[in-house]
Amino acid sequence: MTITHTYDALIVGAGGAGLRAAIEASNAGLNVAAISKLYPTRSHTGAAQGGMCAALGNVEEDNPEWHTFDTVKGGDYLVDQPAAEIMCREAIDAVIELERWGLPFNRTPDGRIDQRRFGGHTRNHGEAPVRRACYSADRTGHMILQTLYQQCIKRDVRFFNEFYVLDLLLDPDGRFAGVVAYELANGELHVFRAKAALFATGGFGRIFKVSSNAHALTGDGPAVAYRRGIPLQDMEMFQIHPTGIYKMGILISEAVRGEGGILINSEGERFMERYAPTIKDLAPRDMVSRAIYQEIKEGRGIDGKDYVYLDVRHLDPEVIETKIPDVTEFARIYLGVEPLTEPVPIQPTAHYAMGGIPTDVDGRVVAGPEETPVPGLYAAGECACVSVHGANRLGTNSLLDILVFGRRGGAHMAGYARSAVLADPGPEPEKPIADQLNRLMTESGTGNPADIRAELQEQMFDLAGVVRTEEGLTKMQGILKDLRERFDRVVVMDKGRVYNTDIMETVELGFLLDCADTLVAAALARDESRGGHYREDHPLRDDANWLRHSLAYREDDGSVRLDYKPVKMGPYIPMERKY
Amino acid sequence: MAEDPQVEVREGPPREPAGESPLAATSAHDKIELRVKIKRFNPEVQPDPWWSEHVVEVDPLDRLLDALHEVKWHFDGTLALRRSCAHGICGSDAMLINGKNALACKVLVKDVAPKVTIEPIRGLPVLKDLIVDMEPFFDGYKAVLPYLVNDEPAPEGRERRQSPEERERFEDTTKCILCAACTTSCPIFWGDGQYIGPAAIVNAHRFIYDSRDRGAKERLAILGEKSGVFRCRTTFNCTEACPRGIKVTKAIQEVKRSVMFDL
């Protein structure tokens, strides 16, 4: 039996972007429901560590224009400059608003919000690192998630927790009509009708084996939209963070280097001095990850193995204790390493999707090269692509993104929902999902989804990670085809209805495969190197041909069709990207 | 800043042509056997709980969560548990591990091998296997007004000032991830179903001692009721259970003192 609900507006996903949008929609007096596959406080915003940049200028001179420049240059000029300008300007109000809501920022001696250095954030267009990141020890994301959730409780926002949104419903005119969700507790399908919805489902870093991402980050929102004809933008732009805990991929914040930590190779050399002479270890993440790759490749990994050291032994233990306590603890727990006296083994780890569902600066989903809005459909945060991160996101800018565009999307959606009429999703809108789940539950098959997922993750990390080639990506396309065929015959072991996480993990694997398909197709086509997309066979940036966003569409036969649209330029003309 | 837009960019030292990735995702460790005994419950199968036992091959440095995944992914897909971040931040996977509450993602295999016994956290209704009903837990959290209360005008466009010392006063309790390890380790919470529990008090503490907050009186009144802080018998289970190292019992004692002397 399917249960139907009707609301003014829906929020899909309850991390930072979703909660911020929910607050905005609630403030506007809408009847709003937030649907989340996790309890909101489990969302991956909580794992963000180092800080949130805003040009407050609390500890040294700064201004939003410098921040905008850094964001554009850091993104290797694939950033839409008007969007970056909005984000960096509104970042200041976003930080002040969080402080008003009680976020416990670290403070300066005179009681203002303290700020610290972060990768790629500089004074006056690259002169030197600048102290721009507002932070709460190394649990800034945790405090943001808690603070936003607290504000939702205060406003009595209606949550549907542990509900998985599996389909997007559009009416024949292409207007948003609702979503279909699966209730984990009892296996029921629900149709949520509403005038508008904002997707804030997070990233898809689980396509890679070594990943900082939570198990839940399976690209549900992008994949659901993609299957309904909405293209995914810049999917080839995936950030591999330089410092993950060796083998596990657990993130060690860039704040460690912001506080003075350095990277060293097997010869004890601070190798980033060779790659980025001015800002050294605080170069943008894509450059540092490639530098580590290069050191390892040239035999200067520790003991000849595939890792290098992150070293904080020279730092004041007081700084470590008050500013980076959690990541220090991670090293102790997961590596048995004492960072005060021993260097920490790290390797690059898959971290952040710059690409996703294309939106404008008000969070409206825009469907093609001509950027036609899908009426009533919004997206924000990592599942969306505004694009403020371009080809490589700067550290801390994801937290700005979720707050600034979560708010803007929520506000625009509220205005839209006030005047719009409810669209009709048609008869039996849940049927495609019901059929899919029914097949998984009843048919006999041969494949184990866990094995397919493990192979996907391993191969993607090797062939579509830090360094890519035509040969490797072509091979990956073949592997994906094979994995897809195996996935089509897959079975689940759990045939029950109560908390059947087996069937939901299998559905999530399907989402991961969609994300991987689009990533690999767009990466293969882009025969240049830019930001997080590094093609060893085309190592140079090629602005004449590739200063444009990719759009990946799903064809009826499941293949990927690529299209492109121009980057929205502004005052910054592409220049050589060195630090 | 303008340079030739056609310029092609190269960064770092020159690179060699394509080859095998030096950042291989696979690397071998010597695996060991771990016997995983789990208390199971599935209302669709039978009304009473039972025990399952599996032997899995895992890396000693794997998390216990990885071993549970090995059970779920290769032996019994019906095994139900909650997890997400897998490094002790999201608070999903609190369980009773060898008789003590902990997060499965913060316990390493080498520290429990060769055998581990896992049960759901206690004091909340079990829904399936290791999944319990979290609603009563979150109801307790919501009851203490877990948000900053301050209607006074703030400086225009600027932050409210707070000294590092004022912030330090409540730093410890900001670390809470709402995993319920503390609350479900508390014998008083198991016992009478009325105690609001340690986690709710921790989250009240986080605001009561925040120099910017004005809601302390109301929260202390709530916590002074019979479901509140005075049910605590200071057994320190909560402090031992907290995966974030919060001094939970100390926080509860501070709130007790404030209820007595500040109300």
Image (cartoon, rainbow, N blue to C red):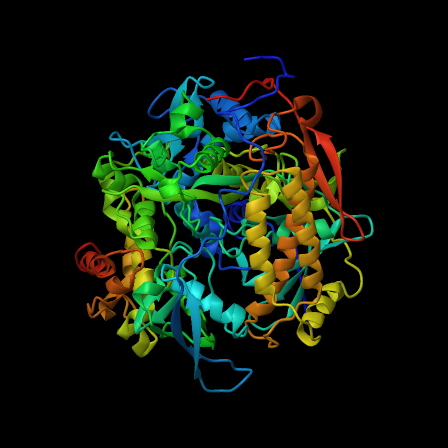
Residue at 28% across / 62% down in the picture? B223
Residue B66 appears anywhere in the view: yes
Rendered-image quadrant of the N terminus of chain A = bottom right
Give the total of numbered labels: 0
Q: Nearer the viewer, residue A168 or A350?
A: A350
A415 versus A549 height, above or below: below
Query: In the image, residue A20 lies at what x, y percent?
Result: 52, 45
Q: Nearer the viewer, residue B135 or A65?
A: A65
Residue B209 appears anywhere in the view: no
A199 versus A527 height, above or below: below
Q: Nearer the viewer, residue A251 or B11?
A: B11
Query: In the image, residue A394 lies at what x, y percent?
Result: 49, 33
Q: Is residue A18 left or right of residue A318?
A: right
| Residue B110 in which image quadrant | bottom left
Q: Kindly give the residue lying farthest to the right in the view shown.
A: A172
Residue at 63% across / 39% down in the picture? A236
Query: In the image, residue A345 lies at what x, y percent?
Result: 36, 44
Q: Kindly give the residue lying farthest to the bottom in the view shown.
A: B47
| Residue A282 in which image quadrant | top left
Residue at 34% across / 46% down in the picture? A327
Residue at 22% across / 56% down in the picture? B263
Query: In the image, residue A311 lies at what x, y percent?
Result: 31, 37
Q: Is residue A287 left or right of residue A221?
A: left
